[in-house]
Image (cartoon, rainbow, N blue to C red):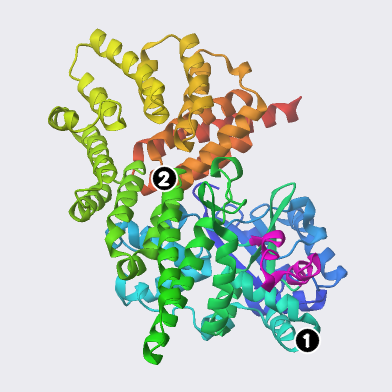
Amino acid sequence: MLGRKSKFFRIDCSEVLTKAQIEKQIKTDTNQPLSQLFFNFKKEEKETIYFIIFDNIKSEMSTEALMYLSNLPESLYKITKNTFLIFSSSVEIKQFNRFHIELEKLTLHESQLILNDRFDSSHFNQSQISKIHELSEGVVDKLEQIMSFLENSSVEEVLAHNDIFDDDFHLAHIPASIMSHINLLSTDHSKKLTLNMLKILSILKNGETLTNLRRDKLGAKFTPKQVQELVKFELATSVRIDPSTMVIKINPIIKGYILSKLSKDEIFKISNAYLKVTIYRTKEGIKLSSLNRKVYQTGYSTEEDNTGTLLLYSIDSCLRDIEKNKELGICNEMNERRLRQLSYYSSSYIYILCKTNRYAETVSAIDLLIDTVKEIDSNNLYKYYSHMAEAYRMMANYSEAKKYLKLCESLCPQDDHRALETIYIERLYLLENENIKDAISLAKIKKKEFHKNSAAYVISEVILAEAKYPEERFKTLVRLEKKARKLAHITTANNILFTINKERNNVEKIKNLDKAIKSDKSSYNFCRATIYKYQTLVESGNYDRIKDQNIIDLLNIYNYLFRQKFDTLFHKCHKLLWDIADYRQRLDIIGMIYYKGTIVWSLNSDSENEKRYLARYQEIENSTTIRALEYKVE
């Protein structure tokens, strides 16, 4: 396809039910019948690639019409080789199972790439990009709507606009057939439970399981029947997390429309009810619901969206009740106690996200909650800034990390010794990345302010070891790794282990990396240790020791690193997976990681990696073509 132009045609099938209606719609949307289209495409076979998108195919479409569409690719191939057909539907249609894939929503990276393509990258800061992505929910139509406003207004003006997705937008993007289903739920009393499920899921923006929906009295009577009706009416989809867990999720545009029709009282009632389901207090502390899985294992998580949204609505509800009681002269003791509890839930939620290494979600959640925190919990604002600084540092956005660390330090009370220690450690890590001499100077000055068994003291000694001769430095790091492990500073111990492992032989490396994998609860360090282990096997040519399950684990880690924007480790994982896939001739893996890699390199203006992997990809494409030709000759 290289060097050829691309052209697209979209056929809107939202109101199409028969074969005759398909043919009529093709003529309406392209101004010519399909046979004439194919004839014209063939004339430009060498110059142009054509895509015909049959969009919004309905489950109610007749069997004859569905068979007609599903047989089109075979008919087309006999006429021309430069045209591709794309069929899209919000429901599963059995006639298309043989060439069926599920489309995912845009990632943060992809949203940023689209924004940078439409506007100059200097147009946005990272926080604004995160807010725009959160607002669009990864939906192309919603992102297009936001960008249309950005053409004539500033980013801050658009983000402050509460009516970006108004009735005009919803009516333009929700087909009449689906709107009729929504109206049916609203008017048919027998569908009341299904309507209630739709309302609840419109607030639980990232989906929820039927089991969790039933944990509050609002959803106690829900059954699989309501789920089936929502899917049948093309209002929702189901996502399988594992064999025992199915998440039900509303189409984001439909969600926005339903939410716009709910009263404040309904929104607050649902939010207060389901906040208790997603986040709750136990003897061990605050917990998130059972859906809160390690992201590198499942690649899907709900709490970072649902909990933040539910907290925001619940706090608004509490503040409204406080204002009402003040006007009526009624005591607010219960409401004020409730507000303190919600503040505690908010800070605990952010803490959980950060300490489970979900840094992209940490930034997104704080952006969502920060204005409310300033109003109700300003004394603890420095803790949010501390988490923001750590998150941005881990994502290698050092300018934002320094900004939030400075804000944290300016607000931090001098008697919060734990927070002061965290600030010091963050500053050491930032200096270590920028200027090791400055980091060493700071460690010399500050080390003795901390207890000898503290993480801050051990990390200071690690930094100071960089000033020693290589042999002495190695011995010091070995001693500090043992000390940190004995003191249960496991993540610090493994960070040291990764450094000293560079100077060990392959057998020792793998032994130590296995120790790190088993001991560290940090998702990030688990990923590092796993990548370094298989990197060692590849470097020594032991490809056969890497099993299929190991490759699946690496692919999950790759997706986790991609979502979290851990670019340095992402590059290592990318090279590792490419080498393994190339050795095993796994073109499916190479295709997937090449696509994701190009997004990261483009965002980072990394032309060197773009050129390197384009050359490698074309080399693989060419060798595959040659092998195919040899096979035909034989």
The picture places residue 289, in percent across and down from the top left corner, at 59, 54
* Quadrant position of residue 199: bottom right
Whether the magenta-drawn stretch holds residue 541 is answered as: no
The stretch in magenta equals 208-232
* Type of amino acid at the residue the image marks with label 1: His
* Quadrant position of residue 367: bottom left
Residue drawn at point x = 57 percent, y = 52 percent: 301
Query: What's the mark number on residue 565?
Result: 2
Mark 1 vs 2, N-terminal side = 1
Looking at the image, residue 280 lies above or below residue 216: above
- Residue 75 visible? The answer is yes
Which residue is labeled 1 in the image? Answer: 189
Comparing 70 with 232, the one in front is 232
Looking at the image, residue 604 lies above or below residue 145: above
Dot 2 lies on which element? loop
Query: What's the mark number on residue 614?
Result: none
Residue drawn at point x = 73 percent, y = 69 percent: 220
The picture places residue 492, in percent across and down from the top left corner, at 36, 28
Q: Is residue 358 found left or right of 630 in the rendered image? A: left
* Quadrant position of residue 306: bottom right
The picture places residue 164, in percent across and down from the top left corner, at 44, 78
Residue contact between numbered discs 1 and 2, judged by CB atoms under 8 Å = no
Comparing 142 with 385, the one in front is 385
Comparing 87 with 367, the one in front is 367
Comparing 9 with 129, the one in front is 129
Q: CA distance from mark 1 to mark 2?
A: 48 Å
Specify the principal SS of the magenta part: helix
* Type of amino acid at the residue the image marks with label 2: Lys
